Image: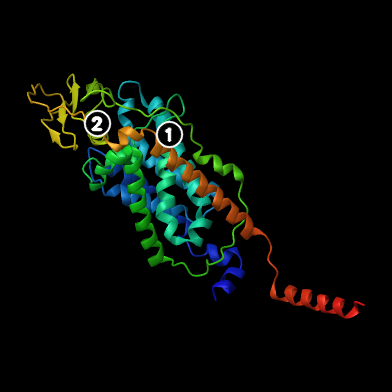
């Protein structure tokens, strides 16, 4: 029956997916859910929901449709997340930066759509594919253009989540990978419940451009390490975040908390009139001041000389995730190309057998 369903053509396969209006709604909700995971909201579990909704929305879509849906989710995330950038310079730079960052999620949407053939062949691979695509996208976004802009990484929404401890093993990329893997499991459960996997044992797909492989091309650059993380015994971050607003200051503090876990160092964020705080090596927050509130912090900080796995590995986990993402794309493209080749129908197979029989009869 699975073979018969596959032979029915691409319509039989592609009909089992969210309707277009539902895919658009899922993408819009994905951006809102991911936004809710970051400070000042701090609903870290919402990141899993957002990534899962986007994964379901783009599955079995054409790459260009996946790009549009990914871009929609990206705008829903980055336009409000980066609103602090327009406080001093106006709306134009803010929208330009948010649109640029949303473009990376558009590339992610195209890549996720392109890997649908792989996921349909092996549904268990969906969480892993989602994990490496997200980690690869963030590696690219953190480096280009002009050195990148890593603000809004999934990992930076997880300072209070159980996954934050993974930063000591592989830094922010490992945390992002874990969040996306968990979200992939949610996507598998949601898809199985709503649409199922019948009729996709031998998926039929139209050809897609090999240029999609460039969606997660990674320019390997230096790992951004806070001052003192590699050789010192503490992390000290000076900031003028009072120039912006409370949301920006809280988001920056969440990043520092994750970096403290990543490098096993106590961290101190010293702001002029924004938020100042002391962070323990396990990411626990100590003595955080209020925004625009005069305060003096006096606390003894125990310096640390230990080296975490993440500090020793440096950029290697991010490179590994990026290579895995590119490999998943290439494999998916190969599967699509093979499955798009015409297969002999039962009637044509019968005619071929008859001609062979005639030839063998006429042979001397």
Residue 135, horizontal then vertical, whole percent: 40, 42
Residue 83: assigned label: none
Count of numbered marks = 2
- Distance of label 1 from label 2 (alpha carbons): 19 Å
| Quadrant that contains the N terminus | bottom right
Residue 58, horizontal then vertical, whole percent: 47, 52
Label 1 sits on a secondary structure element that is: helix
Which of 106/348 is in front?
Answer: 348
| Quadrant that contains the C terminus | bottom right
Residue 285 located left or right of residue 128: left
* Residue 25 visible, this angle: no
Please tell me in which quadrant of the rendered image residue 139 appears. top left
Q: Which residue is mark 1?
A: 141
Residue 128, horizontal then vertical, whole percent: 41, 52
Which of 56/309 is in front?
Answer: 309
Q: Residue at x 42, y 28 (%)?
A: 148
Which of 310/322 is in front?
Answer: 310
Q: Which residue is mark 2?
A: 256
Crowd band around label 2 with a 10 angstrom C-alpha radius: few (<14), some (14–19), many (20+): many
Q: Is residue 285 above or below residue 298?
A: below
Residue 343 located left or right of residue 316: right
Crowd band around label 1 with a 10 angstrom C-alpha radius: few (<14), some (14–19), many (20+): many
Which of the colour schemes (rainbow, by chain, secondary structure, one colour) is used?
rainbow
Residue 203, horizontal then vertical, whole percent: 56, 63
Residue 302 located left or right of residue 249: left
Label 2 sits on a secondary structure element that is: helix
Q: Residue at x 36, y 51 (%)?
A: 181
* Residue 254 visible, this angle: yes
Please tell me in which quadrant of the rendered image residue 275 appears. top left
Q: Residue at x 53, y 48 (%)?
A: 329
Q: Residue furthest bottom?
A: 361
Q: Earlier in the sequence, mark 1 or mark 2?
A: 1
């Amino acid at each position: 029956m699975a073979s018969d369903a596959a032979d029915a053509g691409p319509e039989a396969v592609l009909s089992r997916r969210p309707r277009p209006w539902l895919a658009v709604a899922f993408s819009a909700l994905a951006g809102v859910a991911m936004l809710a995971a970051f400070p000042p909201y701090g609903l870290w579990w919402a990141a899993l929901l957002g990534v899962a909704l986007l994964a379901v929305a783009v599955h079995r879509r054409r790459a260009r449709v996946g790009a549009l849906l990914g871009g929609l989710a990206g705008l829903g995330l980055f336009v409000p997340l980066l609103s602090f950038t327009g406080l001093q310079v106006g709306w134009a730079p803010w929208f330009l930066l948010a649109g640029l960052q949303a473009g990376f999620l558009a590339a992610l949407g195209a890549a996720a759509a392109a890997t649908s053939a792989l996921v349909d062949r092996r549904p268990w691979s969906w969480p892993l594919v989602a994990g490496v695509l997200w980690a690869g996208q963030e590696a690219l976004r953190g480096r280009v253009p002009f050195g990148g802009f890593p603000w809004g990484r999934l990992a930076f929404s997880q300072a209070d989540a159980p996954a934050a401890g993974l930063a000591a093993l592989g830094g922010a990329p490992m945390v992002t990978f874990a969040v996306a893997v968990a979200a992939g499991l949610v996507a598998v459960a949601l898809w199985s419940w709503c649409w199922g996997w019948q009729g996709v044992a031998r998926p039929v797909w139209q050809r897609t451009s090999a240029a999609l492989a460039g969606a997660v091309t990674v320019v390997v650059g230096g790992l951004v390490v806070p001052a003192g993380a590699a050789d010192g015994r503490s992390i000290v971050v000076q900031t003028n975040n009072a120039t912006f607003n409370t949301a920006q200051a809280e988001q920056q503090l969440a990043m520092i908390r994750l970096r403290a876990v990543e490098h096993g160092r106590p961290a101190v964020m010293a702001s002029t009139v924004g938020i100042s705080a002391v962070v323990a090596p396990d990411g626990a927050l100590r003595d955080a001041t209020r925004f625009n509130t005069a305060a003096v912090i006096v606390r003894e900080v125990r310096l640390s000389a230990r080296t975490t796995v993440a500090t020793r590995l440096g950029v290697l986990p991010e490179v590994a995730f990026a290579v895995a993402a590119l490999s998943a794309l290439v494999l998916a493209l190969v599967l699509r190309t093979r499955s798009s080749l015409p297969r002999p129908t039962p009637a044509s197979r019968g005619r071929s057998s008859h001609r062979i029989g005639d030839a063998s009869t006429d042979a001397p």
